[in-house]
Amino acid sequence: MINVLNDAIAGTSSSSNGVFTKVQRADGSYQQWQMQMLFDKLDELINALRR
């Protein structure tokens, strides 16, 4: 039973492997489209982690 749980836990990190990182850096004057891109990427990550 413990091995099954350990195997399940070990596989959870791979569910976010399809989410690519952003190369854009922080800026004090974000435009609206930049903020939307950030929220879209956050949604993508959340959805990937729910799978």
Image: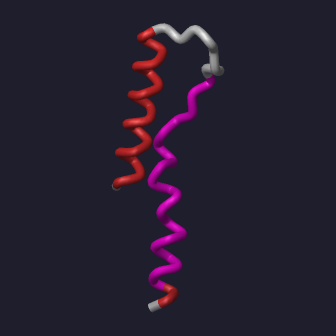
Q: Is residue 12 left or right of residue 47?
A: right
- Decide whether the magenta segment is chiefly helix, strand or loop: helix
Instruction: Determine the residue located farthest toward the bottom in the rendered image.
Output: 1
Quarter where residue 44 is shown? top left
In the rendered view, tell whether residue 31 sits above or below residue 4: above
Q: Is residue 32 left or right of residue 26?
A: left
In the rendered view, tell whether residue 43 sits above or below residue 38: below
What residue is rendered at 44% in x and 35% in y? 42
Q: Residue 7: within the magenta?
A: yes
Residue closer to the observer: 10 or 37: 37
What residue is rendered at 45% in x and 83% in y? 4
In the rendered view, tell whether residue 20 sits above or below residue 24: below
Quadrant occupied by the C terminus? bottom left
Q: Position of residue 45 (x, y in %)?
A: 44, 42
Q: Residue 9: within the magenta?
A: yes
In the rendered view, tell whether residue 28 sits above or below residue 20: above
Q: Position of residue 15 (x, y in %)?
A: 45, 54
Instruction: Determine the residue located farthest toward the front in the rendered image.
Output: 28
What residue is rendered at 54% in x and 69% in y? 10
Q: Position of residue 50 (x, y in %)?
A: 35, 54
Q: Which residues are magenta?
A: 4-23
Quadrant occupied by the N terminus? bottom left
Q: How is the image coloured?
A: secondary structure
Q: Position of residue 25 (x, y in %)?
A: 65, 20
